[in-house]
Image (cartoon, coloured by chain):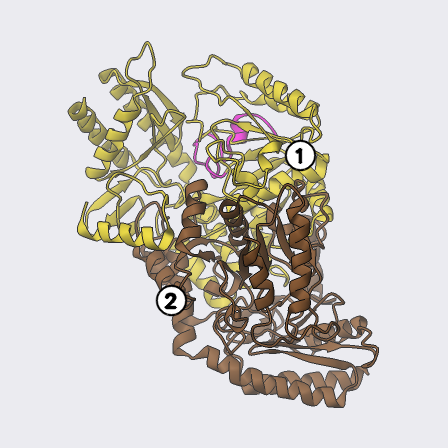
Chain colours: A yellow, B brown
């Protein structure tokens, strides 16, 4: 670890407190970024195979110019009328199914999920929420309790409203058409209906990204969605990670699941790092929420945020980034499969578009997770200038989720390096 | 109302849903702003006497340049180490009392208050929170229940943790040294201690801004703060509106109250409209929170947000804006007092620095609120090119809270126009 990083870590401890997460054993001190490239303080260059927030590329000039232009002109709030927020919501909802026509703009995905759950409460009059046991939907007091990794002792007793179903896991749990998952959801619905809170909603990432993106057939979520509707509940799709063309085949992952969510939640990549999130719903649901709850967000939907978000949509469209995600993703997937043939430790290869990865195991038959090896690999990759991470309930899946302008060449560099690292470490 | 505003309002209804607040009977369509000036779509100029978010002036060039420069260089998150967030927190906490040395950066004041309440929970092991009955601390499921105007039917039952004391009101309730307020707090502490949740914290804006900024002697809050400490609770000061030099006499309103808050919450003006908030606390409190709750905020503390926030501190200091708030505020106050002599309807004049206003009454002896007249006045002012608002439990107090570069000339224009409007409407 360099002396300057050590000094920064000491300052972090003093100024941010303990237990503030960093990546890697030897954290990276990034000072500059362009497109898919990062530079550290010593001038070393890294290929970014991880960050989804700079969706259309780090420091994308169109987004930066849009922010600069609007910040130089006007930045107020929605208590004055302004075209920015209206033009953006019109354009955004045009990419979604017919029922989704209105939105609340927020500053983060956490704020958006916090609203989504209250929408479900105001529509159903109930409070019971179902999620998977490996999910993450944000950091407010309410939505943080959706994550089982957070201890409920801090959280105002909100854990009482949440029930968890086992996360889908295509590598270990046979559930080819989603009926097993649906029956687990049905069980939790029944359980909640026995309590005073009742059943209000199922919230999922429709690509199950935090659940390490299991391989699923199109429409896999349909049986669960059907049961949710039959029980009078809402389907909330959290597209914070999976949306905006990332999966290559569809602009929204819920389309691949062939479901029509009642509420869609957006965040991270929406404005390329400018703090923007949103909740999209039908006009009816929005009216029920807005009439039962006086919601105003000072920064939400401000002209600068909307200009940044609009520039992301422009850039995605003009640079045909979803099509790029598809072809480069297909190529990357094939290269990962080739590595899988070479290395026994690559138990499974999953993903599509520009979100993919490999599950590392000690033994292909037993499928015992190679969690330690995965950690060694990502730290070794970092030292060879490749930024990626790991996830999953055993932390043994390589998480590769680069900015959307990721190229065939970038994929080659990634997998050539991974090949080197694996051949060295095994 | 112009045709274009009518069209925008129709689009708002369709895209944002019902019940989305706007200012004025005839909402303003602002398209451009510089310093303390706003322009609408028809080219009409308005003096902004209301907006505190653009703290160092609308489209402040130093802030805009800082955003542009950093957004062109790097915008990542705190999982990589970076000086930006550290330099900012160091500089920010240097303006506060010795005990406050650490911070969590967020995107909004709402997120920050949501954390502050969980800090109180993690430190005390209790959940009962006391606030005033006219307050507002944000829009998450948790903190929105602090506002009594929100119906508890949507809010996951969180209202059970909150108790409200009557807001201070220097015009109607005699409490010269804060002992009456303190005894009301003591009563609620005792009430909470009888419940399973116990007493965790008192949260107040130390200038009681939403309570229509009552006139108070320095140290007025001390008796209440003392009782809170004796009961083992925390004092949370929400400086979202009152901080950053606005009150002229002190950089933080808690200094004027001569109290040492355990937690300070920041938001709105912090980065001049860029979505930034923060929670500042002692190292001990931060450690207790961070060790009992795994908190990460993707956008919180990102390099661009920190650059914008730092530029605000630079601008405040170099342009000596707090000193300006003091002298212009004193002058404005005197001009309001002169109007009070002329117009019977101005029952009380309050405030300091660049947050001041007048309480409008039907009769000075009875002090019956002139709520309707106040509404007429602010709408008439809007039509004469002056942007201000009203607040208070009877919505009868003019709320004047302009950007910090507000000048003597600006104050003259404001009060000359107010004089005209009052002489016409009465």
Q: Position of residue B171 (x, y in %)?
A: 72, 75
Cβ–Cβ under 8 Å for marks 2 and 1:
no
Instruction: Give the CA separation, mark 2 to mark 1.
Output: 43 Å
Is residue A133 visible to us here?
yes
Confirm whether the magenta stretch covers residue A171. Answer: no
Residue A273 in sight: no
Q: Position of residue A237 (x, y in %)?
A: 56, 33
Is A88 on the left or on the right of B153, as rendered? Answer: left
Q: Residues within 10 Å of mark 1 (few under 14, many from 20)?
A: many
For the magenta stretch, what is the residue range?
Answer: A240-260
Is A419 located above or below residue B158 in the figure? above
Host chain of mark 2:
B
Task: State the residue position of label 2.
Answer: B94
Q: Report the residue that reaches farthest toward the left.
A: A424
Q: Which quadrant would residue A11 be assigned to in this image?
A: bottom left
Quadrant in which residue B44 is drawn: bottom right
Secondary structure at numbered mark 1: loop
Secondary structure of the residue carrying numbered label 2: loop
Q: Nearer the viewer, residue A151 or B26?
A: A151
Q: Is residue A179 left or right of residue B68?
A: right
Q: Residue at x 49, y 47 (%)?
A: B123
């Amino acid at each position: 670890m360099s002396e300057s990083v050590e000094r920064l870590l000491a300052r972090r401890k003093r100024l941010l407190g303990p237990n503030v997460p960093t990546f890697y054993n030897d954290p990276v001190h990034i000072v500059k970024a362009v497109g898919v490239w990062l530079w550290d303080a010593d001038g070393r260059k890294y290929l970014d195979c991880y960050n989804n927030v700079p969706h259309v590329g780090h420091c994308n000039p169109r987004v930066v110019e849009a922010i600069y232009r609007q910040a130089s002109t006007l930045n107020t709030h929605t208590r004055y009328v302004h075209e920015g927020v209206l033009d953006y919501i019109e354009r955004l909802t045009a990419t979604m199914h017919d029922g989704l026509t209105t939105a609340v703009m927020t500053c983060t995905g956490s704020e958006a999920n916090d609203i989504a759950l209250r929408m479900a409460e105001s529509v159903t009059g109930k409070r019971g929420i179902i999620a998977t046991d490996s999910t993450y939907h944000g950091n407010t007091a309410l939505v943080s309790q959706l994550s089982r990794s957070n201890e409920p002792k801090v959280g105002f007793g909100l854990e009482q409203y949440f029930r968890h179903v086992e996360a889908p896991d295509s590598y270990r749990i046979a559930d080819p058409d989603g009926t097993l998952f649906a029956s687990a959801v049905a069980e939790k619905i029944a359980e909640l209906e026995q309590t005073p809170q009742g059943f209000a909603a199922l919230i999922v990432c429709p690509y199950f990204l935090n659940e390490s993106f299991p391989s699923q057939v199109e429409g896999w979520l349909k049986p669960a969605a059907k049961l949710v509707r039959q029980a009078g509940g809402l389907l909330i799709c959290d597209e914070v990670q999976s949306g905006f063309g990332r999966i290559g085949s569809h602009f929204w992952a819920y389309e691949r699941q062939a479901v029509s969510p009642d509420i869609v939640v957006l965040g991270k990549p929406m404005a390329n790092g400018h703090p923007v999130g949103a909740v999209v719903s039908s006009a009816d649901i929005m009216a029920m929420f807005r009439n039962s709850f006086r919601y105003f967000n000072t920064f939400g939907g401000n002209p600068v945020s909307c200009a940044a978000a609009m520039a992301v949509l422009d850039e995605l469209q003009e640079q045909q980034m979803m099509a790029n995600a598809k072809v480069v993703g297909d190529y990357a997937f094939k290269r990962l499969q080739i590595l899988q043939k070479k290395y026994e430790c690559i138990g499974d290869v999953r993903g599509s578009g520009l979100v993919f990865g490999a599950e590392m195991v000690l033994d292909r038959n037993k499928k015992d997770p190679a969690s330690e090896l995965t950690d060694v690999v990502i730290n070794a990759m970092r030292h060879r200038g490749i930024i990626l991470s790991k996830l999953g309930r055993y932390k043994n899946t390589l998480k590769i989720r680069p900015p959307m302008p990721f190229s065939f060449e970038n994929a080659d560099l990634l997998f050539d390096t991974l090949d080197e690292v694996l051949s060295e470490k095994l």
